[in-house]
Amino acid sequence: MRVLDSGTVAELLDPDALLSAVATAMVDLSHGRASLPPRIAARVEGAGLLATMPAYSPTAGVLAAKLLTVYLGNAAAGHPVHQAAIAVFDPPTGRLRALVAGDLLTAARTAACSALSVRHLARPDARVLAVLGTGPQAREHARYAARVHPFGEVLVAGRDPDKAAALARELDLPARPTTLAEAVAAADVVCAATSTVAPILRDGEVRPGTHIASVGYIPDGREVDAAVLREALLAVEHRATTLAPFPTGSNDLAELLERDEIAREDVVEIGELVAGDHPGRSDAERITVFKSVGVAVQDAAAAAAVLAAAERAGAGTDVAL
């Protein structure tokens, strides 16, 4: 098998190829062609969890499984909160083809799907992008969102002002650090990539017509308050996945569904937007929300795109097990 370490992945990852691969995988999923078993997780009490995420996308021709750990306490020690590896198999034979470092791919494929939501749900005249969070997910969201829409200004906000300033400097964009309140009040599009428990996008504070991509994913986390979710046009990667309880889905949406405060049939999938099966935004004043929980077909598509680039370039290390 071929092993692609994190440096090789960073060198070979092409954002446009990733956007295309994720879009294809999401259409496969929405059209019932992909195989996506529910995510399962083993919990380490007081520390974190290990999730297992297999998937098959026939159009992309990829069979893969990701192992992902989520350890929120790592941030305080300067270690990654999310760590991952993706195994890629040959669909016809089941042969293990590659093992791919998954940290950057996880952040990038998540950002790519959020960018697809921006492409299809943000107002055409949206000018200000707010990025909430200062970690790898926030960085990739700024880059990918700006790749699909011409923002005039990018506002970066987080718990640590120094980290927000550092991320703003790092981005090759018209970015500046600011407070959370200012970022939300000024934004036309919000990408929230935080570990917050209490909602930071609240009713009355989010401007009419704003598009929100919320990717924060912890058991008790709530980036967007229930009042906003109830009234918004809701988009997800996969209804059956996102509307299930954690660790498969998103507790905030699952609880609203259980209380009949949202309807399953009113939730649109990203693949339906990409394929043109749903018209997307029809009201310039309505808030739209993409709630991401991450699905394995994205990882499979991302790993396949990087593996194809590695095979063309002769990159990576061949290892016999």
Image (cartoon, rainbow, N blue to C red):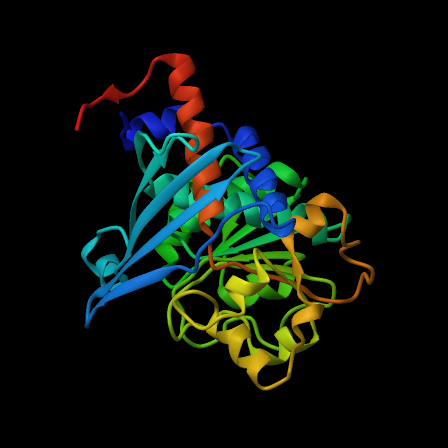
Residue 214 lies, with reference to residue 304, above or below; the image says below
Query: Does 164 sit left or right of 77 as displayed?
Result: right
Name the residue at 52% across, 80% down.
Answer: 255
Name the residue at 82% across, 59% down.
Answer: 282
In x, y percent, where is residue 246? 41, 70
Name the residue at 56% across, 47% down.
Answer: 113
Q: In which quarter of the image is the C terminus?
A: top left
> In front: 262, or 58?
58
Q: Quadrant of the N terminus?
A: top left
Residue that sits furthest to the front in the current view: 93
Residue 58 lies, with reference to residue 135, above or below; the image says above
- The answer to whether residue 245 shows anywhere in this view is yes
> In front: 320, or 143?
320
Query: Does 108 sit left or right of 183 as displayed?
Result: left
> In front: 227, or 304?
304
> In front: 31, or 292?
31
Circle count: 0
In x, y percent, where is residue 320? 18, 24
Residue 143 lies, with reference to residue 184, above or below; the image says above
Name the residue at 49% across, 27% down.
Answer: 14
- The answer to whether residue 204 shows anywhere in this view is no
In x, y percent, where is residue 139? 44, 45
Residue that sits furthest to the bottom in the current view: 259
Corner quadrant of residue 42: bottom left
Corner quadrant of residue 319: top left
Query: Does 93 sit left or right of 260 as displayed?
Result: left
